[in-house]
Image (cartoon, grey):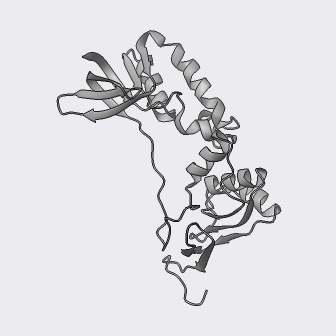
Amino acid sequence: MKQAELVIIGGGPAGLCAAISAAKSGAKVLIIERNKYLGGQLVKQTHMFFGSEKQYASTRGIDIPEILLNELDKHKENVEILTDTTVVGMYEDGVITALHKEDDFFKISAKAVVAATGAFEKSLAFPNNDLPGIYGAGAVQTLMNVHGVKPGNKVLMVGAGNIGLIVSYQLMQAGVEVVAILDAAPKIGGYLVHASKIRRMGVPILTSHTVKEAIGKDFIEKAVICQVDDKFQPIEGT
């Protein structure tokens, strides 16, 4: 059985930052990542980050893992990294079971564990929201920015936060027509600089609007949208 002082499950931005902080403090860290490469969501984020300097503003997401790994390398005597490895179980006695490359099963005895396994996107509830062609923004970023695949030719974006605005712009750069951006909130959630860029390219941003239903047989063909009130309820006749 493998011994570890601190196991960090997930080698994305949160896991890497946790590893840096722990290694700096002298802890022996074991990072476990199911993918071949560290960086998590950052590997699909080709846009420049926004916010403060500490949050790597003006740096492209795809370049941030190298910055974090260089920082981690300063404490490499305290760090071990296992990629292509999936944690498949955690038990009350502190034992973790893991699978490396689908055939190497082993156990780890850990004194402490940090779960940095990321998040999953919420899906908007409406009739037929499981039709092929209805994606989350993360899936679209993976298709375009990692695999170079266009998700479609005509897109309706739901969500006017920074991700919705940035992914809309990336879609247009890839030659996709963005017909509109909807947001149920009464105001745009993303930075106005992003919204202004989208509007200058002729894309309407409809606040206080949502999807009522999707229409299609084998895939998405149309979407019915409606206006919502201040309690996010559909307004009849819109």
User: Which residue is situated farthest in the front direction here?
Assistant: 218
Is 151 located above or below residue 155 in the figure?
Answer: above
Is 158 located above or below residue 53 in the figure?
Answer: below
Q: Position of residue 91 (x, y in %)?
A: 21, 33
Q: Position of residue 174 (x, y in %)?
A: 76, 50
Q: Residue 202 versus residue 87: which sits nearer the camera?
A: 87
At a point 61% along the width and 24% down the height, the residue shown is 66
User: Which residue is situated farthest in the bottom direction here?
Assistant: 237
Question: For the image shown, how many numbered marks are present on the structure?
Answer: 0
User: Which residue is situated farthest in the top direction here?
Assistant: 77
At a point 24% along the width and 16% down the height, the residue shown is 1
Q: Position of residue 234 (x, y in %)?
A: 52, 82
Q: Residue 179 versus residue 102: which sits nearer the camera?
A: 102
At a point 28% along the width and 26% down the height, the residue shown is 112
Q: Is residue 24 left or right of residue 70?
A: left
Is 28 located above or below residue 85 in the figure?
Answer: above
